[in-house]
Amino acid sequence: MAVNGMAIAILIISFLIMIFLRFPIAYAVGISSIICLLYMGLPLQTVCQQMVKGISSFSLMAVPFFITMGVLMGGGISEKLLDLADSLVGWMTGGLAMVNIVASYFFGGISGSASADTASLGSLEIPMMVSRGYDVDFSTAVTITSSVEGLLVPPSHNMVIYATTAGGVSVGALFLAGYLPGAVLAASLMVFSYFISKKRNYPKGDAFSFKTFLKQLGTSIWALAAVLIVVVGVVCGAFTATESAAIAVIYSLLVSVYVYKGMDWKGVWDALSSCIDTLSIVLILISTSSVFGYCLTTLHVPALAAMAIEGLTSNKILLALLLNLILLLLGMIMDMAPIILIATPILLPIAESIGIDPVQFGIIVVLNCGIGLLTPPVGSVLFIGSAIAKRPMEKVVKATLPFYASMIIALMFVTFCPDISLALPKALMHYAPSVTANWLTPLGQ
């Protein structure tokens, strides 16, 4: 075997072995990179240089700000967003399931985290649904699947990580691109919830009242305004993503402490401590993944992978499905950030070669990773939901099976209907996407 081939084998095999031995992902990425560099005879100073280079990015400064914003806005707003969603869709069959899904859409735009959505709203929604006669496993399944909307609806720090990794992709365009796919996912989950609720005779809520809706909207507008600060500021060019995130942190602090009064200054200090824990994990992942990415690039793995995958078929539809399958499988064994950091440099060139725009591919990556958060063995959101509901993971997975189908349907729409992702960036930012694929034309024609 050639030197490069052996180095690639050492890098990939050592990484997979450590993953299956349940090493922390940052250690698995870092150690496998070091072993590979030693085999290639490169100095270990390269590790430090690439780790520093990986996090020395102005755009990445938005990540800690968005995480801090989400934690601060958690103070006192969960109940208000639930009330707003209830006033909007609670009248439907299976009303509380619909409220759960719509509330996740609202809350996701503030926290940007599926885990935060499940932990914050789930502790309220699951007991509430059970007390109204809903099955506990169904309630948990609705909660965890709807939380994935938070990864798509801006501001999402995972979008910032993708934009940085992909290189040159507009954060503002990615933010706008997430709204309609998030709505498609919510609609798909609501359709499945409706039919299950109808079959099981789950109750409706109170009749719709426009007056009540306006009242709840007025109460919740302070929380929703945080999203407007970020998205409008970035889209209009008034701020960079980092600057808008910093302003949103200050705004979130004032709203949580002085408007909603759901957090005192001691709570703020505790929230900031929690942020440091989360940030340390994210930044270590980014820095070690930068070394891993350096090894992949040096060994020309992206080009080799592209040639291998494109050599399987010239059918663009099959290639697009294969990209989704690879991302779904990665989501089952890895967390979201390392998938974005490691897979994007490899898979993005393939996606572009079949006509998928980088912004659209970012949405595809995030949605696939979101589904991975709900699948064993590494589904962190699945574990959080099971813990909140105090239910065995196997029972929750069984109840979630119909919702997996609804999420895959939404994923197919996002993959094969580019305008679901690109319509808003094109309309509001005059974004010029790359030529999208004619899915019926073979590759190379």
Image: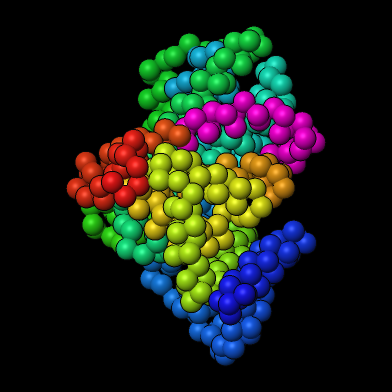
Nearer to me, 260 or 237: 237
* 193 lies left or right of 352: right
* 206 lies left or right of 320: right
**Residue 290 percent coordinates (x, y):** 51, 72
At x 24%, y 58%, the residue is 238
Decide if residue 315 is in sight here: yes
Which corner quadrant of the image does residue 275 belong to?
bottom right
Decide if residue 263 is in sight here: no
Nearer to me, 112 or 290: 290
* 419 lies left or right of 202: left
Q: Is residue 423 above or below residue 191?
A: below
At x 54%, y 28%, the residue is 406
Residue 403, magenta (yes or no):
yes
At x 53%, y 33%, the residue is 407
The region drawn magenta spans 385-411
Q: Residue furthest front?
A: 1
Residue 217, magenta (yes or no):
no
Q: Residue furthest left?
A: 430
**Residue 284 percent coordinates (x, y):** 59, 70
At x 64%, y 83%, the residue is 39
* Most frequent secondary structure within the magenta stretch: helix
